[in-house]
Amino acid sequence: MPRYQAPLADIRFVLEDLLRVEQLATLPGYEDATPDLIFPVIAEGARLCEEVLFPLNQSGDAEGCRLEKGRVFTPAGFPAAYRAYIEGGWTRLACAPEDGGMGLPELVYFVMEEMVSSANLAFGIYPGLSRGVYNAVRRHGEESLKRRVLPRLADGSWAGTMCLTEPQAGTDLGLVRTRAEPDGAGGYRITGTKIFISAGDHDLTENILHLVLARLPDAPGGSHGISLFLVPKIQVRDDQGTLGTANAVSCGGLEHKMGIRGSSTCVLNFDGAAGWLVGQPHKGLPAMFTMMNAARLAVGLQGLGLAEVAYQHALAYARDRLQGRALKGARYPNRPADPLIVHPDIRRMLLTMKAYNEGGRALAYWIGLHLDHEARHPDLRTRQAAGELVALLIPVLKALLTDLGFEVANLALQIHGGHGYIQDNGIEQYVRDARITQVYEGTNGIQALDLVGRKLPQATGRLLRHFCHPLAAELEELGRDGADPVLAALAAPLAKAFGRFQQATVTIAIRGLADPDEAAAAASDYLRLFGLVALGALWLRMARVAQEKLAAGATNPLYRGKLDTARFFMAKLLPQTGALFAAIQAGAAVVMDPEDERF
C-alpha cells in the first residue's frame, strides 16, 4: 500500500545540526524566524502533505484533467485540497508581509516544496508556478501592477503560469513569434500561441496570470528582442484588483502526458489579449530568468521529493516482503523466509537511495540558506558571495537532483520487482512523474551547458571559488596528522574526487577556449562530476556533525546512520568520479567526428 511520512527527523538534522537554522533570526526581517516558529510550521505542513495531498496522488494520476467547452477541470479532490492549502496560509509562506505574506525564509519554503513534491507533485505544480510569478512581478513590475496582483497571488486566490514555449521555439527562445501591440492606453495586446504551459488553465482559482514572452513591433531579432508581459485570464479593472470581463486568452487543448497527469498542461491561444509590460521593453528574457531560476531550484526539489517517497515505499516493501534466505543462513528462522532487506543487492540499492536523498536534501537546503543570506544579510560582500554561489549551483542542483530522482524511482521499482511495474503499488507513477523533471525548465543537457558556458567563466572563475576554497581548506584540515581518524578516512576519497574535479575544470577551460565543442561535449559528465563532489562535501560535513554529537554522548541512532551512509557514499558512489573524469579527458572528437549520415 503506498505510504508517505515526511522525513521530519532528517529535516531537523539538516536544519538544526548541519545548517544552524537559528542564524536566520539574526538576519534583518527574519527576527521572528526562530526554531520555535520554524519547526511547528514544518510539522503542520507535513500533516497537510500526509493527510490531504498524498491521498489524492494516485487518484489524480488515474483521473487526470479534462477540457470541457473551453474550461479545464482538475481531478476530484484537487479544488478542496487547494482550498485547504490556501486556508492554511501556505501560499503566503515566503511572500512579503506588505503583500499579505508571512515573510518566512526561503529555506522554510524549500522544505515545504520538497514535502509537497513527495506527497503530490502534480498538485504542487499549481501553487509552485504562482510563487514564481509572484517573485518575477515583485522584482520587475511597476508599483501599480504590484498593487493589483501581488496580494492576490500571495493569498492564493489568483494563480500564475510561465508562457515561453511555442511550437517552433523551445530552448531557442530567439524564435518566439508571439506579438505584442501597444493599445494606445498604456497597455498591450498579445497575439500568439504557447504550448506545454503547466497549469495553463484550471478550476482552482478565480483568476490566472500568465507571464508571456512576446515581441514588440520595433523589437530586434533574436532573444535580445523579447519583452515580458503579464496577461490575466480575467481582466483586472483597477489597482485594487477587482475582476472585469474575460480576456482574449483560451485553452486550445490539453496534452496527454506520460506523468504528472493531475497537472494541466495546456495549449494557450492569445487573440489580442490585454496585458501589462513587466520590466523594460526588449529585456524580457532577463526578467523571465527571475522566475526560471526559481523554477529550476523548485524542479530540483521535485526530484528530491519523488526520490524520498520512492525510497520510503521501497524500504517498507524490503522490510515486509519475504523472499529467500540470507546467504549466511536464515536471519529470521521463525518465518517462512527472510525479508528482502537481508540480501546484499537490496541493501546496495536502499543505501544508494538513502545516500542520494539525504545528501541531496543537505545540498538543497544549504543553497536555500544562501538564498536567504543573499536577500537579507547586512554585509554587502556576504550577500554578493551568497548570490554567486547560488547562481553557480542552480544548474547543478536542478540537473543532479532530477537525474537522481529518476534513478531512485527506478531503483524503487527494481526492489518491488513485478509488483513495482503494476499500478497498484504506486511506484510506476513515480518513475513516470520523475521523468519530466529532467526535461522541463531547461533540459538537463541545457543545465550542463549553462554551467560550463556561462557560470564557470563568469567573473573570471570567481563563482567557482566560493565552492572550491572552503572545501579545499576543510580537506586540508582533515588530512593533517592528528585529525579525527573516522573523518580523515572519509575525507581521503573525497580529496581524490575533488582533485579530479579541479583537473577537469582546467581541462574544460583550456580546451573550450580553443574549441567550444570541447566544453559542450564534456558538459554533462562535468556537471555530474561536480554534483557528486558537492554531495561528498555535504556528506563529509554531516559526518562531522554526527561524530561530534556521538563524542558528546548523543544516543540518537540517526547519528550512527549518518556515519554509515557517509561511508557507503564515499566507498560505493563517489568512485563514479573516476569514470566521469576519464570521459571528460577523452575529448570531443569521439562525439563530433562521425558524419551526420553515420547515425
Image (tube, rainbow, N blue to C red):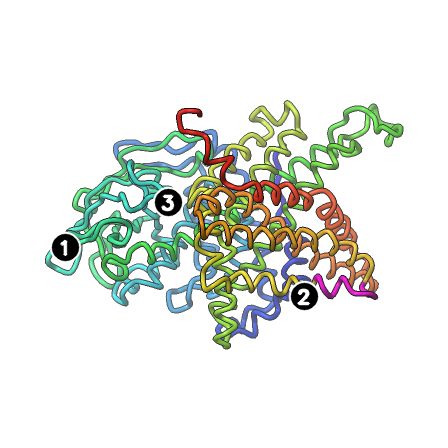
Residue 479 falls within the magenta-colored stretch: yes
Helix, strand, or loop for circle 1?
A: strand
Task: Specify the label residue 182 is tagged with.
Answer: 1
Helix, strand, or loop for circle 2?
A: helix
Q: Earlier in the sequence, mark 2 or mark 3?
A: 3
What residue did someone put label 3 on?
204
Q: Amino acid at mark 3?
A: Leu
Q: Position of residue 554 (x, y in %)?
A: 81, 61
Residue nearest the viewer, comparing 317 with 503: 503
Mark nearest the camera among 3 and 1 is 1
Q: Earlier in the sequence, mark 3 or mark 1?
A: 1
User: Is 116 placed left or right of 189 in the picture?
Assistant: right
User: Is 415 placed left or right of 162 in the picture?
Assistant: right
Q: CA distance from mark 2 to mark 3?
A: 51 Å
In the depicted structure, whether residue 557 falls above or below residue 269: below
For the point 72% across and 48% down, which residue is it?
570
Quarter location, residue 143? bottom left
Extent of the magenta region: 475-483
For the point 29% across and 65% down, which residue is it?
147
| Pointers 3 and 1 in contact (C-beta within 8 Å) | no
Q: Earlier in the sequence, mark 1 or mark 2?
A: 1
What residue did someone put label 2 on?
473
Residue nearest the viewer, comparing 483 with 551: 483
Q: CA distance from mark 3 to mark 1?
A: 31 Å
Q: CA distance from mark 1 to mark 2?
A: 56 Å
User: Is 316 placed left or right of 52 in the picture?
Assistant: right
Task: Specify the label residue 496 is tagged with.
Answer: none
Q: Amino acid at mark 1?
A: Pro
Q: Amino acid at mark 2?
A: Ala
